[in-house]
Image (spheres, grey):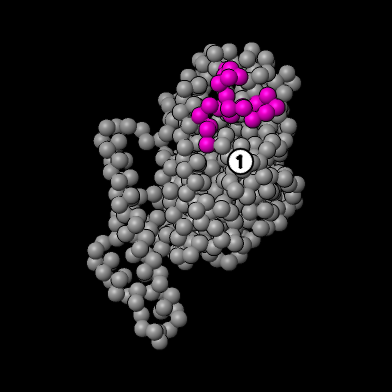
Amino acid sequence: MDTWTRRKFLVTSGVTAGAALAAGAGAWGVDELLATGSGTPDGEASTLVLVTLYGGNDGLNTLVPAADPHYQDLRGDLAYEEDEVLPLGEGLGLNPGLKNLKKLWDDKHLAVVRGVSYPKPDHSHFRSMAIWQTASPAGPVPSGWLGRWLDRAGDGDPLKGVSVGATLPPLMAGTKTAGAAVRLGGKPLPDAWQRACAELSHPDEDAHPLLRRAATSLGDLRQVSRSFDAKSDSTSGEKDERDEKGEDDQDGATEGNEGGSAGAESALGAQLDVVARAIEAGVSTRAYSVSLGGFDTHANEKATQSRLLAGLDRDLGGFLSRVRRTAAGRKVVVAVYSEFGRRPKANANQGTDHGTAGPLFVLGEPVRGGFHGEQPALDDLTDDDLRTTTDFRTVYATLLREVLGTDPGAVLDGYDKTLAFL
C-alpha cells in the first residue's frame, strides 16, 4: 500500500498512524519472526489465518447459482453453465477454479457463509474495507477488530498478531498494542553470525536459565536461517527478474484497479509459506493476516477472476495440506473475505460493478462444513444489489469465541451472535 493510499485508508477507518505507532506496531523480518519460535508447535492453541481479497470479489461467480434462470439472464456471457461449476447442492456450485475447496467441502471442512455484508452497505472500497477491518458499521473507530483482541490479550507479546507484508493493516491496530508487520524476503544470516550463533548455542550445564534460553533462541535462529535462506534468495531472485522485465508483481492487477487493490500483497503463496513455517517453528502468533489483490473486475472479468480464484485455491490447498502434518496445523482456521461483492447484472464491458453481499469461506480441519446463512434471492434485489442475509460480525464473533478464545461482545461493542461452523 503506498503512503497516500495508506493514509486515506487509515483516516477513513478512524485508525490513525499515530495510534498505530503508539500501540507499538513494528516491522519484523521473516528470520526474526521464526527465530522466536519454541521449536515445538503448540498443538493446544488454535490459529486464525485471515485472507483479504482486495478489490471486491464477485461472489456470484465464486459461489455460482448456475441453475437459477435469473442468474443466466442477468449475467449473459459472464454466466457459468450448470455443467461448468463444481456442485455443492441447493442449486449452487463453486467456480471451476476452486477444486481444492471442493475437496474440502466433500470432506466437510469448508463452511460457506452466504449473503455476508454489513448494515447499509457502501460501494466505496475504502469505506467498505474500513468497516470490515474495524468491525464498526456505525462509524469510524480508532482500532481494528483484531487490534482490540490484542488489547484484551494483555500479555505484551508483539507477535500475537502478525500481518505478512510491508505494512500493518488497520485491523491489527489496537488502542494499547498492535500486531507486527513481517516483511517478505530478506538477506541470509552472514557466515560470521552463523558461526557465532553455533558457538553461543551450547552453554555450560550450570549456566543461568535465562542464558540457556538465549542459547536455545540462537540455535533456533541458526536452524531457521539455514532452512529458509535458500528459498528466500530464490523468491528474491524471481522478483528481481520480474522487476527487470518491468512486470507488475501484484496478482490480477489491471489498469484502473489501483484503488480497489490497495493494500494487497503479491504472491499469496509466499505469504502463506511464511505462516506455515511460523506454525511449524512454534511461534506464539495466534492470528495472521495475508492478502491477494486484483478483484476489482469492472471489465473482462471472467478470465481474470478465474485465474485469481485458481491461484487462491492452489495456495490455500497447498498451505492446508502442509500444516496438517503438525498438531498445531490441524487447529488452523482460515477465513477468506472481500470488502464487498459485485452487482448481479453484468455491465457493458464484460465485467461487474461494485455491489454488496457475497459469500465468505471458512476452511480447515476444525471447521464444520456446510452452508450457513441464506442465499440472497436474485428476484428480490435492493436498488439492483443483493440483500444482506448475514451480518459479517457473526463470523467475527464466531472466530473470536471459538478460535481466539475471547468474549466477542467485548471486542465487537456488545455484538456476540455466532454461527455454528466451528
Q: Is residue 94 visible?
A: yes
Residue ID for mark 1: 107
Residue 129 in percent (x, y) is at 58, 38
- Does 331 sit left or right of 36 as displayed? right
Among the 4 quarters of the image, the one containing residue 85: top right
- Does 272 sit left or right of 201 as displayed? right
Q: Is residue 116 above or below residue 38?
A: above
Among the 4 quarters of the image, the one containing residue 407: bottom right
Q: Which residues are magenta?
A: 79-100
Instruction: State the residue in front, 270 or 137.
Output: 270
- Does 338 sit left or right of 272 as displayed? right
Residue 209 in percent (x, y) is at 45, 81
Instruction: State the residue in front, 301 or 95.
Output: 95
Residue 311 in percent (x, y) is at 46, 34
Residue at 68% x, 48% y is 422
Callout 1: few (<14), some (14-19), or many (20+) C-alpha neighbours within 10 Å?
Answer: few
Residue at 30% x, 71% y is 198
Instruction: State the residue in front, 153 or 75.
Output: 75
Q: Circle 1 — which element?
A: loop
Please check the rendered image and state whether residue 88 is part of the magenta-colored stretch, yes or no.
Answer: yes
Residue at 65% x, 36% y is 112
The extreme front residue here reads 107
Disc 1 residue type (three-letter): Asp
Residue 381 in percent (x, y) is at 72, 21
